[in-house]
């Protein structure tokens, strides 16, 4: 059988496809796991190891942040939330924990209808108190790769110059290339939103905190992770620099220390910069039927919330495949 064909499983009439997922971040790996566990033969092509992707840089608190379209995001996010709540039963294995914290200045009534379905969130004078998934991304990405392997899939290090390369080997290709979609699709609406983080030795903080000003490219947050306390952050549109800026580091530490003064004396142990893959018009989940019976399915443009909608978007892709 040629690799570019689909077959029908005689046991249940299920169409089994050869699928290549291009992109090895959280969206690509989650999509690959969902498809592999539904019986498809899945390979992930990734230019870099998961530990070097933008996903590995993320904070990463579950919360719909800098992502559109609003009418779809809530459903994707809630699906993903339920998945993380299940994974949080095995935090050492999955990298997912449920942690208490505060969204300062946030009002429940200002959010979309999805917020009314949150069970562990309450309105207080300062903002929203919540118990939400906080994901140790390096650990979670490793877990996704293991789970993909257990489902019969695998990850291959491969740089792709065009989707035709993958379509020559599989009947279905899923585009989870994030910022790479700007050149590969090509889609000029894809642009970076730069985020810079600082990692410090945790001085004993066990809750997360966020405060975002929609009118500014500076945000204030800290997340207690196993590798240290992650401080943030920035949201600098159309900035391609991946080099940490020392002045930005100083401002991030100062903002966080105004909330928790003990942060001011914490030793800095690392810097992170990631380019969020934003897109004009928001997330694109769409299938293209191409000549020869092959199919290209897009799943990109997740902005600052790829972690938050990963499972919901993966299941949307699976529904497109049938």
Image (cartoon, rainbow, N blue to C red):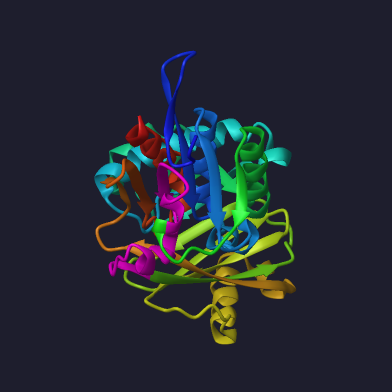
Q: Is residue 193 visible?
A: yes
At x 41%, y 36%, the residue is 78
Q: Residue most toward the top?
A: 11
**Depicted 304 relative to depicted 36: above or below:** below
The C terminus, quarter of image: top left
- Residue 274 pos. (x, y %): 52, 68
At x 59%, y 81%, the residue is 250
- Residue 198 pos. (x, y %): 62, 71
At x 55%, y 75%, the residue is 252
- Residue 160 pos. (x, y %): 48, 63
Q: How many marks?
A: 0
Q: Nearer the viewer, residue 173 or 132?
A: 173
**Depicted 108 relative to depicted 191: above or below:** above
**Depicted 105 relative to depicted 42: above or below:** below
Q: Residue most toward the bottom?
A: 247
At x 36%, y 57%, the residue is 301
- Based on the picture, tell me whether residue 175 belongs to the magenta stretch: yes
- Based on the picture, tell me whether residue 231 belongs to the magenta stretch: no
Residue 187, picture quadrant: bottom left
Q: Is residue 124 visible?
A: no
Q: Nearer the viewer, residue 264 or 76?
A: 76
Whether residue 7 sits left or right of residue 246 in the image: it is left
Whether residue 104 sits left or right of residue 142 in the image: it is left
Whether residue 290 sits left or right of residue 270 in the image: it is left
Q: Nearer the viewer, residue 139 or 179?
A: 179
- Residue 21 pos. (x, y %): 48, 48
Q: Which residues are magenta?
A: 165-191
Residue 199, picture quadrant: bottom right
Q: Nearer the viewer, residue 177 or 207?
A: 177
């Amino acid at each position: 059988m040629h690799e570019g064909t689909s077959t029908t499983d005689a046991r249940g009439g299920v169409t089994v496809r050869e699928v290549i997922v291009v992109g090895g971040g959280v969206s690509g790996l989650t999509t690959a796991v969902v498809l592999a566990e539904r019986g498809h033969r899945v390979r992930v092509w990734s230019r870099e190891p998961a530990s070097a992707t933008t996903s590995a840089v993320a904070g990463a608190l579950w919360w719909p942040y800098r992502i559109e379209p609003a009418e779809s995001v809530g459903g994707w996010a809630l699906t993903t939330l339920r998945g993380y709540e299940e994974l949080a039963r095995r935090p050492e294995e999955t990298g997912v924990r449920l942690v208490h914290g505060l969204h300062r200045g946030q009002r429940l009534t200002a959010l979309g209808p999805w917020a009314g379905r949150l069970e562990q969130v309450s309105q207080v004078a300062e903002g929203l108190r919540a118990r939400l998934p906080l994901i140790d991304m390096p650990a979670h990405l490793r877990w996704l790769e293991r789970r993909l392997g257990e489902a019969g899939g695998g990850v291959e290090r491969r740089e792709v110059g065009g989707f035709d390369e993958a379509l020559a080997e599989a009947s279905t290709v899923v585009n989870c290339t994030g910022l790479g979609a700007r050149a590969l699709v090509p889609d000029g609406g894809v642009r970076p939103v730069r985020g810079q983080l600082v990692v410090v030795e945790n001085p004993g903080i066990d809750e997360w905190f966020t405060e975002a000003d929609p009118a500014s490219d500076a945000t204030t947050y800290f997340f207690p992770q196993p590798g240290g306390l992650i401080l943030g952050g920035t949201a600098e549109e159309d900035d391609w620099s991946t080099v940490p800026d020392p002045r930005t580091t100083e401002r991030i530490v100062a903002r966080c220390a105004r909330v928790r003064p003990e942060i001011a004396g914490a030793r800095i142990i690392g810097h992170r910069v990631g380019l969020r893959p934003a897109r004009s018009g928001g997330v694109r989940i769409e299938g293209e039927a191409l000549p020869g019976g092959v199919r290209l399915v897009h799943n990109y443009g997740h902005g600052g919330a790829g972690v938050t909608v990963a499972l919901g978007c993966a299941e949307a892709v699976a529904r497109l495949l049938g």
